[in-house]
Image: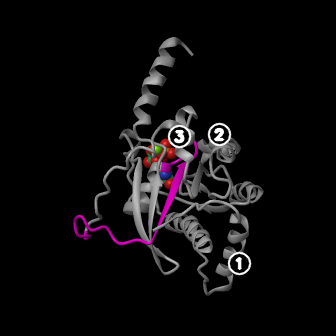
């Protein structure tokens, strides 16, 4: 790397730093149809984080989830740093804030502040032919998560761009890595929309169940009860990881 490269990188990092989640959150505009200045009431706030190599489709996935559309021009824009969704999960109105790494991942220098307070992490790789490196880097990201994020943070692995042929990373390979790390796994396409909502809701729901377990709220179905019991055991003696409001 030349001094020029160093300077350019530092400059770019300074700009990217402005989008860090520990900065005051930008005002969230109400979705179409919602009354201005009246965002839906929520009883739980969940913070999710998008991680993975540059180009795997994090920003596009977030756009697809939050706005229901595929925007092929997204890479040429500054990107979205933050999206808010209001969803009903487990009978509660949940506010889900999703932070996008907005370029930092190119330098693999995502700061600890970025991970701080995240209840859930959506880690993505590109399952198409161009994505082999992003798949191999899952280990790098898992190590970074172990180092910087809360130990009980919920994680989900996404093999994205499954619409794109030829596919290079099979479902079995993706699932094997997810199982190795004990995290959920979805094959997604931000282009077709396949599994995108399911993936985000799965991680958000697990965060909600953990939060409710910490509140001591009981739930009805057996599988929920199991998740709650596991979450309660895991969280014994730990601080709250979901803001209960
Ligand atoms: N075919 C296909 N292209 C995608 C998909 N998701 C993202 N892309 C494209 O991949 C490129 C990188 O996406 P972007 O969201 O900027 O990736 P990021 O760097 O991880 O945020 C863009 O050209 C997207 O249009 C997908 O599911 N299928
Ligand atoms: Mg991006």
Residue 133's tag is: 2
212 displayed left or right of 139:
left
The mark closer to the camera, 3 or 1, is 1
Above or below residue 133? Residue 194 is: below
Left/right placement of residue 114 relative to residue 81 reads right
Q: Quadrant of the C terminus?
A: bottom left
Give SS at disc 2: helix
Q: Main secondary structure of the magenta part?
A: loop
Q: Based on the picture, tell me whether residue 59 belongs to the magenta stretch.
A: no
Of the two numbered discs 1 and 2 in the rendering, the one whose residue sits closer to the viewer = 1
Badge 3 residue CB within 8 Å of ligand 1: yes
Q: Is the C-beta of the residue carrying label 1 under 8 Å from the nearest atom of ligand 1?
A: no
The residue under label 1 is 226
Could you tell me which secondary element the residue under label 3 belongs to? loop
Residue segment shown in magenta: 33-58
**Residue beneath disc 3:** 54
Task: State how far apart marks 1 and 2 are (Cα).
Answer: 36 Å
User: Disc 3 to disc 1, how far (Cα)?
Assistant: 36 Å
Q: Nearer the viewer, residue 64 or 72?
A: 64
The tag earlier along the polypeptide, 3 or 2, is 3
């Amino acid at each position: 790397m030349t001094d020029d490269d160093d300077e350019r990188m530092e400059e770019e990092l300074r700009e990217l730093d402005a989008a860090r989640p520990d900065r005051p959150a930008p005002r969230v505009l109400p979705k179409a149809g919602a009354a201005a200045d009246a965002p839906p009431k929520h009883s739980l706030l969940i913070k999710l984080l998008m991680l993975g190599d540059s180009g795997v489709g994090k920003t596009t996935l977030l756009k697809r989830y939050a706005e229901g559309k595929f925007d092929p021009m997204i890479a040429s824009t500054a990107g979205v740093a933050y999206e808010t969704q209001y969803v009903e999960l487990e009978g509660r109105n949940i506010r889900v804030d999703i932070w996008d790494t907005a370029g930092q991942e190119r330098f693999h220098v995502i700061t600890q502040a970025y991970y701080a307070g995240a209840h859930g992490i959506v880690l993505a790789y590109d399952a198409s032919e161009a994505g082999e490196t992003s798949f191999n880097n899952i280990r790098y990201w898992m190590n970074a998560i172990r180092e910087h994020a809360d130990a009980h943070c919920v994680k989900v692995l996404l093999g994205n761009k499954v619409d794109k042929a030829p596919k290079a990373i099979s479902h079995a390979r993706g699932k094997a890595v997810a199982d190795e790390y004990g995290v959920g796994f979805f094959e997604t396409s931000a282009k077709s929309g396949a599994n995108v909502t399911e993936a985000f809701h799965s991680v958000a729901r697990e965060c909600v169940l953990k939060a409710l377990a910490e509140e001591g709220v009981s739930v009805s179905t057996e599988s929920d009860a199991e998740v709650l019991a596991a979450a309660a055991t895991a969280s014994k003696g730990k601080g709250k990881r979901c803001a209960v409001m």
